[in-house]
Amino acid sequence: MTRLLATVAVMTALTFLTRAAPFVLFARREPPTLVAWLQSRLPPLVMCVLVADALKLVRFEAPASWLPTIAGAAAAAALHLVKRNALLSIVGATALHMALRAWLGA
Amino acid sequence: MKTDRGIGAGNGGANALAPALRATFPVLLGYTTLGLAFGLVLVDSGLPWWLSPLMAAFVFAGAAQFMGVGLLASGAGVGEIALMTLLLNARHLVYGLSMLERFAGAGRLKPYLIFGLTDETYGILSTEEPPEGVDPVRFRILVTALDQAYWFAGCTVGALAGTALPVEAEGLDFALTALFVVLLVEQILARRPREVFLVGAAASLLALILAPPRNFLLAAMGLGIAGLLATRLPRPRRNGSEPPT
């Protein structure tokens, strides 16, 4: 209970902090060149790492241990490249992942 | 197209609701669906249902909430969750930078606009201008509040449904992986500098080999940032393509 409330409090504070930081730091002056340089590079870097994190436990053994995750991720990317509709990509990929899991008995 | 310019900012609220509802309709579909999935995953992880509306009300960050629930369920400490929240939210720094001017006139309500600047709210506010005659501050506040209402409703209903009838949520948490893939594709389509993706892939691969799975994120982000900074260095010598260590 305490742990859950502490987690919510910390996540609330840090999320607000990251959202507010540019308004507080750069309201009156131009961001330094390093910050401006990083702002176009940090988000793609973080997304690469997060996708890798989501896929890191995949093991290429029985199909059930890799197919649902790899096929789901590929479906999300393909759907998004074609339709560029985030909801459709997420729901479609998750449905495929769950169907494959159920089918392969993962 | 209505242009009731005679009506001042005092009545702008009534004017702003219809365009705000229209602008947020895709988010209504997205947030209720994802919120529902979040509530189900949360209860399925053995966490109490009330955590779901509590997070929707105060944290209001889809990806961070999913990740927080995953970490809580795996027994991670508050410090680890704090670090991951910071890393995951680093993209918000960019959103703020491009919203400085749009939020400038919001006055007392500005903190709420900043609080509610999710990926999707940013998507709307950075592309949709309020129609003529509509108070832009009211329009932006309503867009943000509607988005949060959709998210809150989804998270609450999902958690209650998961408590009332244990739904088979096995694999539903893949929604988070799919969300990250979608965000990565968006970054690729946004034509970010290509070397960043190479650095990200190399850092991930290296961290996968070198670091234990528990410390993967920290190792990969550290290597990635070091690698990025290395691409910024001038290259005095011929062998300037060392791995990012």
Image (cartoon, rainbow, N blue to C red):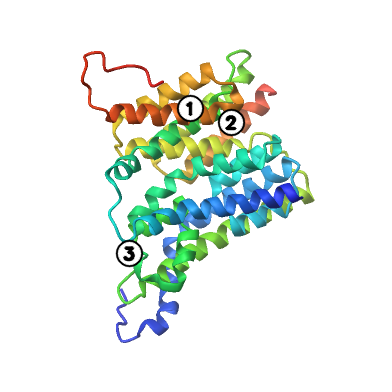
Quadrant containing the C terminus of chain A is top right
Q: Which numbered marker is on residue B220?
A: 1
What is the chain letter for disc 2? A
Q: Is residue B193 at all visible to an observer of this figure?
A: yes
Mark 3 vs mark 1, foreground winner is 1
Q: Position of residue A13 (x, y in %)?
A: 56, 54
Which residue is drawn at the image coordinates 22% and 22% (left, top)? B235
Q: Which residue is denoted by mark 2 in the rendering?
A: A97
Which residue is drawn at the image coordinates 49% and 40% (left, top)? B87
Mark 1 vs mark 2, foreground winner is 1
Q: Cβ–Cβ below 8 Å for labels 1 and 2?
A: no
Q: Position of residue B110 (x, y in %)?
A: 44, 67
> How far is disc 3 from disc 2 in space, using C-alphas?
38 Å
Query: What secondary structure is marked by label 2?
Result: helix
Figure check: B96 above or below B237: below
Q: Which residue is denoted by mark 3 in the rendering?
A: B129
What is the chain letter for disc 1? B
What amino acid type is highlighted by mark number 3?
Glu
Direction from residue A36 to residue A69 in the image, left or right? right
What is the chain letter for disc 3? B
